[in-house]
Image (spheres, helix red, strand yellow):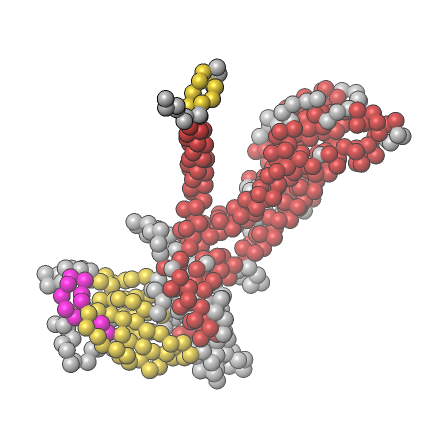
Amino acid sequence: MATSSKAFTYVSGTKVDTAWVMRRRWARAGLMYFLLVFFALLFMGPLLVALVSSLKTDPLEYPPRLIFEQILPKNWGASYKLGQQAGGNGWTGGFAPGANVSFEVSYLVPSSVVPVGKNPELVSVTIPKIRPGAGSNILGNIAYAADYAKIENLKVSSLTPATLPDGKPGQKVTYTWNIVYPQGAKNVDEPDKPAPRVENTPMTLEAPFDYVYDSATLDPSRLENVQAPRVDRAYTYPKIQSFINVTPGVLNYTFRNYFRIFEEARDISSGQSLFLAWILNSFLLVFLMCASGLIFAPMAGYALARLNFPYKGAFFVFILFVMTVPNQVLFISNYLVLRDIGLLGSIFGVWLVSPFVGAGQIFLMKQFFETLPKELEEAAKIDGASVSTTFWRVIMPLAGPALGALTITTAQGAWNQYFWAAVALTKGGTTLTLPIGLRSFNQSYGQSGDYGLILAGAIVSALPVIILFIVFQRYFVASAASSGGKE
């Protein structure tokens, strides 16, 4: 008599197939992971879109592409090689005296335009005198590659049979040339000084009529002057190919906008990088607010949780009431105080008008200390420890999770501080914090449609908060778990 080989188990007293139970468990686990990935993409989607768009030359392109020039390995290799030829640095590029950069471009030419045996026209190659960027970078003196670069050895290097986009026969014409920076070039602005190293080398190619762009050593930044289809040509093609920088180096090519936020926006009087100054100011504000919060909030929270003193309950109610008062209610009086003590336009002024020790910080520490068993303090008291000794040597070493959570919330609030910083930092320029500086970026670069730089600034602004949360998240989770119950 045959017997069944199936395994069974009991679920709530019911006999069920073990394989079915396992499939159900895997299905639940799969559903849970799917939901986690879905919500992660939902909430992180805008940041990821901003990150991808910040790498593009044109973040506003439509339809948007997921595969674009800056992420193609062939362009990484080309930009590294071009950077080495131009200045000896394949990572950050540049254009220095003695540079000799070789470049090539290919076009598809209909047989009706260049018959077999006929020499094609030469492409027009120019190094335009263009000031990079916008905003504050429109002022000040910079070196232009156009003042030093020379185009040499422009020629047709190869001519091979090819097929046009509409399937008609034609030829593939490849041009080569060299971009040379003479070793003994004179400094155009200051003849007594050596010729400078130039950051950007823009280049513009203009092809003869009906020459269809095919490929180049480095993909162009923009395709311009697009010719419309005709009766005898059913496709469009750009007549002009523009390169923002043909000597970028791999990092400067891929993360061009991130280099720009530090290089282009500079203080007119001192030449200091505005973006770097804003970052340093924000870090200083984070340090000041975290230091004051981590020192005084645990003291106040411990006093409310463990010590007995007159009007303790009323004082705690007052702290809860302070949490309900909007900061905007007090900004006029605080502005006048800062004006009178001479701290307008100073990070220390922002620190003073911000919550020196926030009511929420005190409340968080009070609730955490109440979860600790009182036996710890009683044992320390039996051993002769004073209140301050008990606090610093017994209680505070156990407060790591709460202090981690306090660090995250305080640092995030300080880093993203906007209202008080906008009120107190009246001098502008290098005195601003990063959120206020990004607003000025939007005003300067947004008007010209240069959103790549704005997006790069926003991504850099978000990175410290993300890193902070990754570093301290285990303390944050531990604090949330420990505050869920009380012994």
Q: Residue at x 41, y 51 (%)?
A: 52
Residue 126 at x, y percent in the picture: 33, 74
- The answer to whether residue 267 is above or below residue 18 is below
Q: Quarter-wise, where is residue 76 in the image?
A: bottom left
- The answer to whether residue 83 is above or below residue 260 is below
Position of 401 with respect to 451 (left or right) is right
User: Of 201 and 469, which appears nearest the observer?
Assistant: 469
- The answer to whether residue 305 is above or below residue 14 is below
Residue 175 at x, y percent in the picture: 28, 76
Residue 170 falls within the magenta-colored stretch: yes
Residue 333 visible here: no
- The answer to whether residue 299 is above or below residue 129 is above
Q: Residue at x 61, y 53 (%)?
A: 280
Residue 70 visible here: yes
Q: Quarter-wise, where is residue 358 in the image?
A: top right
Q: Quadrant of the N terminus?
A: top left
Q: Residue at x 66, y 46 (%)?
A: 287
Q: Quarter-wise, where is residue 241 in the image?
A: bottom left
Residue 139 at x, y percent in the picture: 47, 63
User: Of 467 and 311, which appears nearest the observer?
Assistant: 467
Outermost residue toward the left in this view: 231
Residue 348 falls within the magenta-colored stretch: no
User: Of 473 and 211, which appears nearest the observer?
Assistant: 473
Position of 225 with respect to 100 (left or right) is left
Q: Residue at x 21, y 69 (%)?
A: 108
Outermost residue toward the front in this view: 1
Outermost residue toward the right in this view: 384
Q: Which residues are magenta?
A: 163-173
Position of 96 with respect to 408 (left or right) is left
Give the number of callouts. Answer: 0
Q: Quadrant of the C terminus?
A: top right
Residue 354 at x, y percent in the picture: 63, 38
